Image (spheres, rainbow, N blue to C red):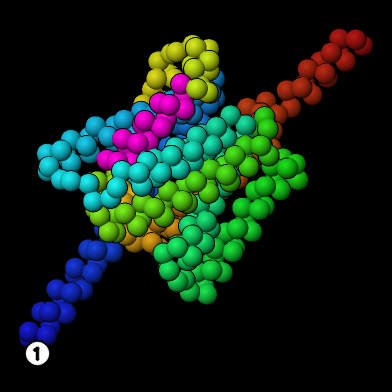
């Protein structure tokens, strides 16, 4: 009996530690996702329209740091290079479209609609990886899609969306989430079969190469028009650090599917709270200082007495 008791106590303690670890990991992914959204929005607000350049620094950092680990291990590639090239092309397009959307839509709309990735991932993993979901998981995904549809209605003018061209920004995000979903499914398959370091390294290498080619074609004029400042450099550096951490943590999360969905849900809930608070502050008129509520009336009364 004592032996069974010890085994039970050991099991419960380790399960609790594992649960805490998963929750902490989910919070970290949520945090870096939110920081990536904030810094990308800040880059756009500073007048920089260079989403490919913005993402290329993250890919370069991934290639250099994780590539050094791969070279140190002298490990041969387990997946053919052209599959990683395809993964890099898809991922770059996703980052380009979503970062471009910040030029036209609000941070709240972009980040909420970015959760479309979850819906696409469910569909793709169902058909290509054979993953099966419960009825409640599908109902939850359907509710999320309905909520995201309300975001589109809001930006269409029903509720007053933010940004210069919110509808264009929204559709850029949705298009970007399709590419993100393809990238996530491919990355999930490779991570579960071949290992995290190789996948992240090759994603960084080919992501950087694809970004360099594309920005040399479509983004050079935008870069020449940028008036570089300390704020812009700090915003891009913040985005690079956030995305580097996200790409480093995402492979761990992809091994626990529910945690990936939870991370997106936490970000979405936080942004909803932020948006509601922001709208409330905009809608309420500034309160007069204490003791001055009748100041205007007193001035008018004094002027009337002078006239008499």
Q: Which residue is at 11% across, 85% downward?
A: 4
Q: The C terminus is located in which quarter?
A: top right
Q: Depth check: give the residue in front, 97 or 210.
A: 210
Q: Quadrant of residue 279?
A: top right
Q: Which residue is mark 1?
A: 1
How far across and down, in percent of the image, does residue 12 sit? 21, 73
Q: Depth check: give the residue in front, 156 or 292.
A: 156
Count of number-bearing discs? 1
Q: Which residue is at 50% across, 69% downward?
A: 137
* Residue extending farthest left: 3
Q: Quadrant of residue 170?
A: top right
Q: Is residue 82 left or right of residue 168?
A: left
- Answer few, some or many: residues within 10 Å of disc 1's Cα (few below 14, many 20 plus, some between 14 and 19): few
Instruction: Say above or below: 204 vs 128.
Output: above
Q: Depth check: give the residue in front, 141 or 52.
A: 52
Is residue 120 a member of the stretch shown in magenta? no
Is residue 206 a member of the stretch shown in magenta? yes
Q: Main secondary structure of the magenta part?
A: helix
Instruction: Say above or below: 169 vs 231.
Output: below
- Check disc 1 and report its element: helix, strand or loop: loop
How far across and down, in percent of the image, does residue 186 sit? 39, 53
* Residue extending farthest bottom: 1
Specify the segment rendered in magenta. Answer: 201-216
Q: Which residue is at 15% across, 76% downward?
A: 9
Q: Which residue is at 53% across, 68% downward?
A: 138
The answer to whether residue 61 of the structure is visible from this angle is: yes
Q: Is residue 179 left or right of residue 209?
A: right
The answer to whether residue 91 of the structure is visible from this angle is: no
């Amino acid at each position: 009996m004592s032996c069974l008791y010890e085994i039970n106590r050991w099991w419960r303690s380790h399960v609790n530690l594992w649960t805490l670890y998963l929750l902490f990991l989910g919070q970290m992914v949520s945090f870096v996702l939110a920081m990536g959204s904030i810094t990308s929005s800040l880059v756009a607000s500073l007048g920089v329209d260079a989403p490919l350049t913005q993402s290329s620094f993250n890919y370069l950092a991934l290639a250099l740091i994780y590539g050094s680990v791969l070279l140190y291990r002298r490990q041969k590639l387990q997946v053919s290079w052209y599959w990683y090239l395809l993964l890099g092309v898809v991922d770059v397009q996703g980052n380009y479209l979503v970062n471009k959307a910040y030029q036209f839509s609000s941070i709240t709309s972009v980040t909420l609609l970015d959760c479309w990735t979850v819906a696409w991932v469910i569909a793709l993993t169902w058909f290509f990886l054979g993953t099966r979901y419960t009825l409640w998981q599908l109902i939850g995904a359907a509710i999320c899609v309905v909520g995201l549809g309300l975001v589109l209605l809001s930006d269409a003018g029903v509720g007053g969306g933010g940004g210069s061209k919110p509808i264009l920004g929204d559709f850029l995000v949705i298009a970007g989430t399709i590419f993100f979903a393809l990238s996530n499914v491919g990355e999930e398959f490779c991570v579960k079969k071949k290992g995290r370091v190789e996948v992240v390294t090759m994603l960084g290498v080919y992501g950087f190469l694809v970004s360099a080619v594309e920005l040399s074609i479509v983004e050079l004029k935008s870069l020449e028009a940028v008036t570089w400042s300390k704020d812009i450099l700090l915003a891009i550096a913040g985005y690079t650090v956030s995305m580097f951490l996200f790409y480093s943590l995402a492979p761990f999360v992809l091994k626990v599917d529910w945690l990936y969905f939870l991370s997106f849900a936490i970000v979405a809930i936080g942004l909803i709270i932020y948006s509601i608070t922001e709208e409330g502050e905009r809608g309420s008129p500034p309160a007069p200082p204490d003791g001055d509520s009748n100041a205007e009336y007193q001035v008018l009364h004094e002027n009337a007495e002078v006239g008499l």
